[in-house]
Image (cartoon, helix red, strand yellow):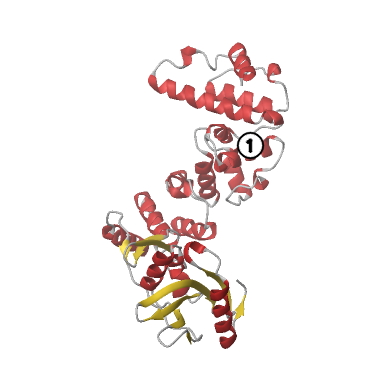
Amino acid sequence: MTRLLWNVQSRSDLLRPARFAGRAEEESLRRLVGGLLALVGYRRSWLRPVEQWEPREGGTHSVFSSLAHHLLANYPVPPVMHSAWFAGSGWWAYRQRHWFRHVGMGGSLRTAGFPIRLTKRMAYEFSLAPAHFDIGFALRWAQVRGLGGSDTIARVVASTRLGREFFGEAFWTSVIHLFLRTRGLDPAHVDLIVEYLNHQKFVQRTIIVGEDTEISIDPPRPDLSIKGCTVTSLLRRAEEWKAEQRPEAPERKRFEWNRSEIREYQRAEDETRAWTIRELLDSDDLAAEGKAMKHCVATYTEFCVRRRSTIWSLGLEGPEGRRRLATIEVDPKTRTVVQASMKCNEEPDEPCLSLVKEWASREGLTVEC
C-alpha cells in the first residue's frame, strides 16, 4: 500500500488536500483510499509496475481510471466499470472486479459472467453507461435500453430493487417486457409493482407455530406468473397489498395435513407402558416436539404440508404420560426413514434404533439413518 500511495502522491494530485477541503470531500477521500486499497489487493495481477504510471489529466475519475488501466488492463474498460474498485468488500465486490479484469484483458462484455445475459444491443448500451452509475444499476439500465425502453424507464426500473438484486431473471424479464408493452406507463407505479411481485414470489415469511416457535415458510405465491396480467391489474393488487401491510410482527398460524399411508406403531413394554411411534399431523405438534427435543423439526412444517416429508415421534407411554425419545423423518414417496434423532440431535441409541427398524420392517420402509 505504501508503494502505491507514494507513487500516487508523487505523480498526481489525486490525494492532495486541495481536492478534499470540505466534509463531502472527506467522504470522497475515504472512498478513493478504499479504491486504492482494492487495487493493492490485486497487486499479484498487476501488469505493469506502478512506478511506470503516467497519470491522465482531468478529474478524480479520469486519473483513477488511468491508474486502474495501467495496473490491470490491456484494453479499454467502460467507464462505469471503474465503480468496481469502490464497491467495498465481499462477494459482490469481488465479482465486479473480476468483470473489470476480464474486459481489461480483452474479454467481451457478453462473456464476462454478468448476472444478466446481454444481447449485442445491451452490451453496447452498457458500454455507454454514465461513469457515476453503479455496475448493477448500469446492467439493469442497459437491459431495459437494449429491449427498446427509453432512458427514463430504464432509470426507473434500475432504481428499484432490480438494480441491486439479480435472481429470478426469467420472471423479472417478463415483467420488464410487460412494462415496455404498456402505453402511457406511469413511472411512479413501477417500484410499487416490483415490490409487490417480489414479496409474493420471493420473500419468505416468518410465522409462529405452537406457543412461540418462529419458522420461515415459502413466499405467498412462489409459482406466481404474470401471464395474462396487465399493469393496471398488477397495480390494483399492489395497492391492496400495500394497504394491508402492518408493522413487521410474525403471524401465528396452525397448519394441518392428512395422515400418511404408513401406519403408526405400538409395542407393549409391560402391563402399563408401551412403546409408540406416532405421526405428527399439524404444525403445533411439530413445534411441541422440537421444543421438547431441543431441535429444529418445526422448520419441516412446509415439507409436511406439501407431503414431501412425514415426521414421527417415538416415545414411551404410560400412566404418567408420554416420554419423547426420538424424532423420525420418513420420505413418503420413497418410503425411506431418512433420519432419526434424540434430544439435541443426538444419534439414536441401540434400543431406539431397534424399535425404528422393527417398525420399518412391519411397514415395508427402508432405513437409511
Residue 105 in which image quadrant: top right
Element under disc 1: helix
Question: How far from the left and from the top, in percent, is residue 257?
Answer: 41, 79
Q: Residue at x 62, y 80 (%)?
A: 366
Q: Is residue 23 above or below residue 199?
A: above
Q: Nearer the viewer, residue 369 or 65?
A: 369
Nearer to the camera, 300 or 326: 326
The residue where tag 1 is placed is 100
Q: Nearer the viewer, residue 316 or 327?
A: 316
Q: Which image quadrant: the C terminus? A: bottom right
Residue that protrudes farthest toward the front in the picture:
271
As drawn, 269 above or below 187: below
Where residue 170 sits: x, y (%)? 54, 60
Between 60 and 5, which is closer to the camera in this rendering? 5
Residue 200 % position (x, y)? 40, 62
Quadrant location, the N terminus: top right
Q: Is residue 138 above or below residue 302?
A: above
* Amino acid type, label 1: Phe
Q: Which residue occupies 58% across, 21% down?
A: 63
x and y, in percent, of residue 268 in the image: 47, 86
Mark 1 packing: few (<14 Cα in 10 Å), some, or many (20+)?
many
Q: Residue at x 61, y 11 (%)?
A: 10
Q: Height in image: 301 above or below 354?
A: above
Toward which corner of the image does residue 358 lie, by quadrant? bottom right
Q: Is residue 78 among the parts visible in the rendering?
A: yes
